[in-house]
Structure formats: structure tokens, C-alpha cells
Image: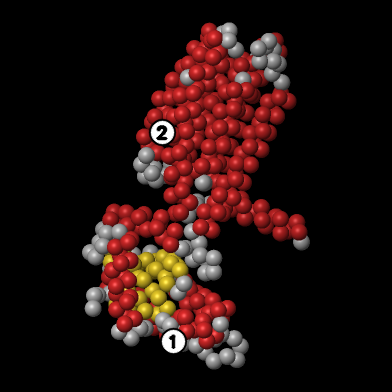
Amino acid sequence: MRSTTAGRHYSEIVEQLVTRPDEVMLEVGASGELLVARLRVAVAAMLLLLPLANATTGGQFSETLIGLAGAVFVNIFAQVWLALARHGRRFRWLPFASGAYDVTATTLVLLMLAWNHLPAGVNSMIVWCGYLLAIALTALRNDGRVTLFVGGLAIAQYALLSLGVFTIATPDQLISSDYGTVTAGGQLQRLVLLAAFTLITAVVVYRMQRLVEMSGTDGLTELPNRTWLVHRFPRLLDAARRDGVSLCVALIDLDHFKRINDEIGHHAGDRALMHVVDMVRDSLEDGEWLARLGGEEFVLVLRKPLGTAWERVDGLRRTLFSRRFVPDAGADPVLLTFSAGVASFPHEASDLSGLLRRADLRLNSAKSSGRNRVLARDA
């Protein structure tokens, strides 16, 4: 039984790591990509010091030139990635591309070292640590797919590099007074370390994803919450602008819910809340999103014109009116109703706060005029 539970837990971790994150996580990941780009610029500037240190400590002139060329290359592209990262999530491929660049840049420097001196290409610890840095930086992207991709790419590239060295080198060429003897066991250990570091970083990303997921999900209903809505809504507006369609926001508030809590208790009140949530959630169509703002207040986002959105929300109101909530077996059914205000983009507001303000005014009008109704026009 315990092994079955553990296996299910591991499968959940793998599933989440390989699944596209939700909007809140992607937004956090976009800011993480910008942070990675800035760190890359700082690290690239520091790399310019390594060739100078090598030259001043008696290193080979050819290795100093290779290190300097690699450092200049890295600095140029660091500025390119920074410029792209400033555009947020416009480039969805950016985390994968920049992560692949970090790995490949490390491999290219190792190849140049190997071209000059074979043992240096596979036994240089300083350059090899570039793989570890590339994998570690994926944790800031908050996307398990990026971590697994970058870690897998690092393992594959270094495995091919090591295999190539062993294929073309003679036993004498694998011995170096500066870098030690190149052995198959030593290279295998490095590959295992890369795999272990990838696994550890992936677990860190999973943990971060869970924390972000919890911050964007309502604990009781498991609906998206205000945090999710704030991060997700700008993307919905962009899509509506691009497609030339309307987007409506319905602010829904359950009628007299405090009285229901007082009469049947808070536990039954939670079940009543779930009764409403399940009814609405089960009837959601494509282009509709339901989020809980708090208490008994919800937001329904509809990719529809105002008139159609009003008909849709009013239909949900009538459905709830016809489905009584039964608190316990044998208990009398309880009537649940809601009032709602609907506002539309782009005709009435251009952002989430403006739409919510307009919808809230109409919600208040619906409540003051008797409740159990949906308003899409100002009174």
C-alpha cells in the first residue's frame, strides 16, 4: 500500500513537471527569465576575468586566447538574451532557447579546449561547471519542462563530447600533467552528477510550482482566485483584441449567504457554496472561466458579446433557482440564488479593474432592486 502511494506521488510529480504551467506560473517564469538574463550578463562579465587570471598564473597562451574568445562570445549573446527577455512572455520559446544556449556555449568552450588539448576538453572542472549553472538557473523559470530539457541536453552533449574524445584519442593523449588522466569512470561520474543535479533542480521547481499553484487557487473550491485572475486577464484581453471579439466580466454574489451560514452552520454553508460552484463549473463552456474573489463573490469571464453574456449568466441564475440545496439527509431543501452585474470589453472598460468597477455597480443595483437578477445595463 505504501509503495503504491509513493508511486502515485512520483507519477504526480512527473506529470506536473512535464505539463505546461498555468498562467500564474508562466507569468512568474517570465519574470524569472528576465532575472536569469540579468544574471547571465553579470556572470558573462565575470568570465572575462578568467582568461586574465589564467595568463597571470602561467597558463598556456593558446588556452588564454580560447577562454577570452569564449568570454567575448558569451558577453555578446548575454546582451541579446537580455533584450529578448525584456519583452516578457512574447516569446514562449525563449526559456528553452536561452537554456539551450547556456548548455551549448559550455560545450563549445569545452570543444575548443579539447581541440587545443584533449584532456582539457573533458577534465576542465571550471568550464564543466557551466552545465551546472545552466541547470540551476532553470529553477528561476518555474517550468519543469525547461529544467528537464536543459538537463537532458547537458547530459547528451557532454556524453557525445566524452565519447568523441575517447574515440579519437590514443592512451598517451589522455594523460595530462595539468588536467590529470582522462578515464571512462571519471566521465561517467560527471554524467551521473549532471543527472542528479537535474533531478534535484526539477524537484525544487516542482516545489515552487506547488507553492505558486496554491497562491493562485482557492483552498475550498479549488477554483482560480484573484491572483490567478490578475495574471491571466491581460492575456485574455490581448487575445480578444487580436481576434476582434468582446470579453465580458460577470461579478456574481450569492444572496443572503450570511443568513444561510447562520441558519444551517458554516460547514453546511461551505457545502452550499460548493453546490453553487459545482453547478456553474459543470456548465462552463469553451471561452468561459470562473474564479472566486473571496467569500460568496465570484467572477465569471465570458468570451461573448454583452447581450449573449447576460443571457448566459441569467440562464445560470435560473438553473440555480431550480436546484435546491439539501444540507443533510432528510433536511428541508434550501433555496439559493445569486445576483450579478455584467460589464464588457472594449465598449465599457479597457482593463480588469475598470470592468470590475462597472460590474460591481450593476451588481449593487441588482441587489438593491430585489436580488436574484442579472443586470448588464446601468440602472
Q: Which residue is mark 2?
A: 81
Q: Residue at x 63, y 34 (%)?
A: 194
Q: Residue at x 29, y 78 (%)?
A: 365
Residue 210 visible to an observer of this rendering: yes
Mark 1 is on which residue type?
Ser
Corner quadrant of residue 288: bottom left
Residue 373 visible to an observer of this rendering: no
Is 194 rendered above or below residue 118?
below
Mark 2 is on which residue type?
Trp
| Structural crowding at the residue carrying mark 2, measured as other residues with C-alpha within 10 Å and reported as few (<14), some (14–19) or many (≥20) | many
Q: Position of residue 358 (x, y in %)?
A: 28, 68
The mark nearer the N terminus, 2 or 1, is: 2
Q: Position of residue 30 (x, y in %)?
A: 43, 45
Is 58 rendered above or below residue 295?
above
Q: Position of residue 16 (x, y in %)?
A: 57, 53
| Structural crowding at the residue carrying mark 1, measured as other residues with C-alpha within 10 Å and reported as few (<14), some (14–19) or many (≥20) | few
In the visual, does 244 lie left or right of 23?
left
Q: Which residue is mark 1?
A: 322
